[in-house]
Image (spheres, helix red, strand yellow):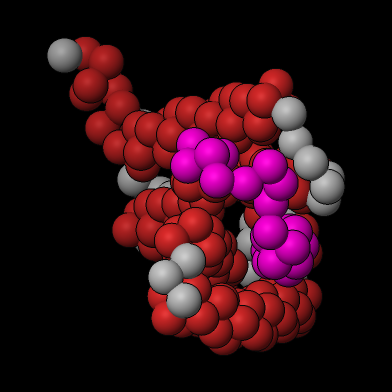
Amino acid sequence: MPNRLFRFFFPEEVDFFTPMARIIDCMAEGAEAYIETAGKSSLCGPEKIALLDHLKKLEKEGDNILRTVATGLKRTFTPPYPAIDIHRMFESLDNAIDLLDESAKIIIHANYRDYFPPFVAKQLTAFLNGAREAGKLPELMRDPRKNSSAITAVLEAMGRWEAEGDKIYWENKKALSEVINSAAQSNNLAGFRRGRMDEMALDLLEQLVDTLLDIIKNAEDMLIEHA
């Protein structure tokens, strides 16, 4: 009881920017490893397992950061931004790491390919570039009034990378639709399954790239509330 009373009258100052920087680093680290694997013309079993193990490790770290932040929000009455906005931001960042893991698993566990389709590395590169821009936000958002122009520039750059990922998505969505329709018409079951699995991976990677929009919106909401 005394400790609770002490925390009530003297709430702690909690640093949310350092864990924010770390979870964004996890996003970029996962994308980099994924791109490296996706760029290979063929993959052996150990390479596939190594990628999944790496992404799972980062996913667990992201979950731990999310729990640490939730605890921190309970320990302070004076967060730098509204608690709900901080929580939403970290959920978006954690969701990105989850989608890296899910999109890799859908291809590797289905075991229908010896290598990743070409669009994977392209979508991931757009996401990685956006994540690298996002990596500038934690330090800038420590002083939003001083850094407002720099924050705006970062968010605009992230938006451009999301738009690039969107372009890659629709180009490949159209091409895969043609492959799937052709396979269905010719009763090519193997080709149909391959096309559908590729389409599922494409859609998950589109959700991954869309997390950049979530991060942008969350950052904008935090800044509006802070103004």
Q: Nearer the viewer, residue 137 or 25?
A: 25
Range shown magenta: 108-128
Quarter of the image containing the N terminus?
top left
Which residue occupies the extreme front position in the image? 186
Residue 25 seen in render: no
Q: Nearer the viewer, residue 83 or 128?
A: 128
Residue 175, given in percent of the width and then of the height, sits at 61, 82
Q: Nearer the viewer, residue 73 or 204?
A: 204
Q: Vertical placement of 32 versus 132: above or below?
A: above
Magenta run includes residue 148: no
Residue at the (71%, 76%) spot, across then down: 161
Position of residue 141 in the picture relative to residue 10 (left or right): right
Q: Vertical placement of 111 versus 28: above or below?
A: above
Which residue occupies the extreme left position in the image? 1
Residue 77 seen in render: yes
Residue at the (68%, 59%) spot, across then down: 117
Residue at the (83%, 45%) spot, across then down: 40
Residue 168, given in percent of the width and then of the height, sits at 68, 79
Residue 208, given in percent of the width and then of the height, sits at 54, 61
